[in-house]
Image (cartoon, rainbow, N blue to C red):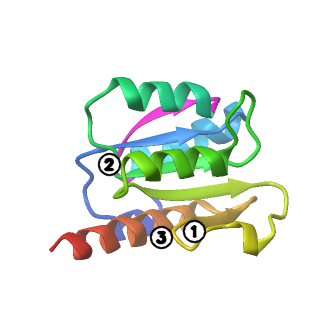
C-alpha cells in the first residue's frame, strides 16, 4: 500500500477521470481505488460532460488531461464544469508544458509525469480544502 493512501480521507462521491491514454486512465483509477474513491472513466471530455449533464450524482472532483480527442479540450471542460457546478474541484494534467498564465487560479495543474504520491496528496488537499470551506 502506498503510504500516502493512509493520509487520504474516505470518499463518498465519484471522481470523474478524463484521460485519452488508456494506461494512464487505468493508473488513475487504480490510485483512486486504493484511496477508497469511486471513479467514472472517459477518454474524451465530450463524453464526460454528457455524462455529468445526464446524472444527478454529486461529483466533488474532476481529473482531466489537457489534450483530448473530440471538440472539448481539458481546460475548456473544466471551465464548463465550473460554470455549471461551481463547487467541483479540478486537476488538469498534461504531458506538454502549459503556460502558467493560461491556467486559472482555481485549477490545480500537474505536469506529466506525476507520481502516484503527488496525485494522492493533491486529491487529498483539494477535497480537504472543500470540506473546510463548507464547514
Residue occupying image coordinates x 47% and y 62%: 2
Q: Can you say whether 29 is above or below 3 in the image?
A: above
Residue holding disc 3: 121
Is residue 97 part of the magenta span, yes or no?
A: no
Residue located at (74% from left, 74% from top): 101
Q: Are marks 1 and 3 in contact (CB under 8 Å)?
A: yes
Residue carrying label 1 = 118
Query: Residue 7: x percent and y percent?
Result: 35, 71
Q: Seen from this angle, which residue lies furthest left? A: 135
Q: Earlier in the sequence, mark 2 or mark 3?
A: 2
Q: Quadrant of the C terminus?
A: bottom left
Dot 3 crowding, Cα within 10 Å, few <14, some 14–19, many 20+? some
Magenta residues (range): 35-44
Foreground of the two, 82 or 116: 82
Label 2, label 3: how far apart the Cα atoms are:
14 Å
Question: Quick one: SS at disc 1?
Answer: helix
Q: Is residue 118 left or right of residue 132?
A: right
Helix or strand or loop: what does disc 3 sit on?
Answer: helix
Task: Indicate the quadrant containing the N terminus: top left, top right, bottom left or bottom right.
Answer: bottom left
Amino acid at each position: 500500500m502506498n503510504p500516502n493512501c493512509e493520509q487520504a480521507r474516505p470518499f463518498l462521491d465519484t471522481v470523474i477521470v478524463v484521460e485519452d491514454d488508456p494506461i494512464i486512465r487505468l493508473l488513475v483509477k487504480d490510485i483512486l481505488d486504493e484511496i477508497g474513491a469511486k471513479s467514472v472513466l472517459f477518454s474524451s471530455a465530450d463524453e464526460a460532460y454528457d455524462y455529468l449533464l445526464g446524472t444527478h450524482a454529486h461529483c466533488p472532483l474532476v481529473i482531466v488531461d489537457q489534450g483530448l480527442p473530440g471538440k472539448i479540450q481539458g481546460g475548456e471542460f473544466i471551465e464548463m464544469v465550473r460554470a455549471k457546478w461551481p463547487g467541483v474541484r479540478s486537476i488538469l494534467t498534461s504531458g506538454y508544458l502549459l503556460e502558467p498564465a493560461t491556467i486559472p487560479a482555481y485549477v490545480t495543474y500537474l505536469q506529466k509525469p506525476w507520481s502516484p504520491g503527488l496525485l494522492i496528496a493533491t486529491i487529498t488537499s483539494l477535497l480537504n480544502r472543500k470540506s473546510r470551506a463548507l464547514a
